[in-house]
Image: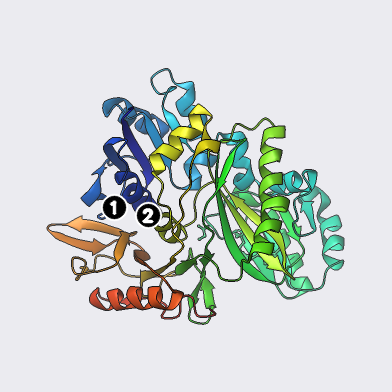
Amino acid sequence: MIQYNVLVLGSGAREHALAWKIKQSSKVKNLYVAPGNAGTDLIANNLPIDILHFEQVKQAIIEHKVNMVVVGPEEPIVNGITDYLISQPETKDCYIIGPLSNGAKLEGSKSWAKQFMLKYNIPTARYHIVTKQNLNEGKNFLKTFEPPYVLKADGLAAGKGVMILHDFHEACIEMEAMLNGKFGKASETIVIEQFLKGIECSYFILTDGNKYLILPEAKDYKRVGEGDTGLNTGGMGAISPVPFINEELRKKINELVVHRTVYGLLHEKINYKGFLFIGLLISNNHPYVIEYNVRLGDPETEVILPRINTDIVELFERLFDGTLDQAKLEIDPNYSVCVVAASKGYPLQFEKGKVIHGLEQSMSTVFHAGTTVKDTNVITSGGRVLVVSDKALTLKEAKQKVYSSLKQIYFDNIYYRHDIGFEF
Ligand code: AMP
Ligand code: GLY
């Protein structure tokens, strides 16, 4: 049996959860996370490198004889880390879980993703692509919609590139600001689209660009405040499975969205090896794609990986030997819930450097996000600090387990939502 030296790139709770799952595999010899956090430090070897400097990643691969790399966040993927590593003689044989830059356009260019959806008849909101050259056309297109108006920066804008505006004139002003560089190069092109009303759901697949496995879906709670109020964040908690995804809807999603998406990748000759996150909006019992992400979601990963019983390294291996269709994906039918413990003030200003207490007592799994080690203490180092995750037969019990574990954890200015999964 081949044994792998695996390197996970990233430093959030998603990467801690990936490392935690990979660590359970019998196929792993050594596990590294770069740069990692105080949580990954307990289960793997953290490597203090800058993952946006691909040369540093290459050197780490050579030094530690890494033969499998799992890329967590989108930025290195969209910047071409996979292309770089397979072009280098020393790293070309390494298995890289993360698409090449042609596949990364699904997330890296919203206009490209919309054209892809149109071409492969994948349901999505009606849209128009606008640059400075056709600004007036864009304004006329906006007039064909009722408010609110949705404007999206074409490129990566640190999760802030989507603007939803309620007034036509405000939307026109915003459109000009975006085209004039509000998000730098990312908003030199923008996508205007129809506002869809409905419920969001995060869908995930693992694909080799031809075959695919559908992973458990999740619902993410993006707003900072209880009852889904306040500012948008990276995500304050998640649940899986999502109770409103019934069999009929699942069939529609699989046929109209997943199947057509992978067919599109194959037809475009995009050799996509990795996770694909499909952001869905369910409106009148029909799925629409709001966005593609070329990675797993955070905090969704912290509820979906605990529900996958299959050895994840074996699944990664199958992406490269063409046997993904032979995988037996075992999914735990239990409910999984996670809640993010953040620094008060997040997603705006917050303090760092607070000592975290009570981690050892937790009965639930605690994935670290913004944490680091100082002297012998684990301290806060980011907005989202920890993600507490647990499972149970019912959603209610899973929530109870997570919230009772959270009561044991303390740091100055800890903030979390008390209502994750409130609608169900
Ligand atoms: P995105 O960055 O593409 O995930 O968009 C951020 C958020 O904007 C999504 O999670 C949705 O809540 C919202 N959104 C994006 N596109 C639309 C749309 N066409 N209709 C309604 N809401 C949208
Ligand atoms: N939780 C949403 C994301 O990862 O983009």
Q: Position of residue 107 (x, y in %)?
A: 60, 47
Q: Residue at x 41, y 59 (%)?
A: 302
Q: Residue at x 67, y 52 (%)?
A: 254
Disc 2 marks a residue whose amino acid type is Gly
Q: Position of residue 51 (x, y in %)?
A: 39, 40
Pick out the residue farthest to the left.
376
- Reading the image, the residue beneath label 2 is 12
Q: Say few, some or many: other residues with alpha carbon within 10 Å of mark 1 (under 14 / 14 to 19 / 20 or more).
A: many
Res 363 visible: yes
Q: On the picture, is 34 further left or further right than 395?
A: left
Q: Say few, some or many: other residues with alpha carbon within 10 Å of mark 2 (under 14 / 14 to 19 / 20 or more).
A: many
Q: Is mark 1 within 8 Å of ligand 2?
A: no
Quadrant of res 23: top left
Quadrant of res 364: bottom left
Secondary structure of residue under mark 2: loop
Disc 1 marks a residue whose amino acid type is Asn
> In the rendering, which numbered label is found on residue 250?
none
Q: On the picture, is 290 further left or further right than 237?
A: right
Q: Are marks 1 and 2 in contact (CB under 8 Å)?
A: yes
Q: Quadrant of the N terminus?
A: top left
Q: Position of residue 384 (x, y in %)?
A: 38, 65
Q: Is mark 2 within 8 Å of ligand 2?
A: no
Secondary structure of residue under mark 1: loop
- Reading the image, the residue beneath label 1 is 37
Q: Position of residue 211 (x, y in %)?
A: 60, 37
Question: Is 118 drawn above or below residue 147 in the view shown?
Answer: above
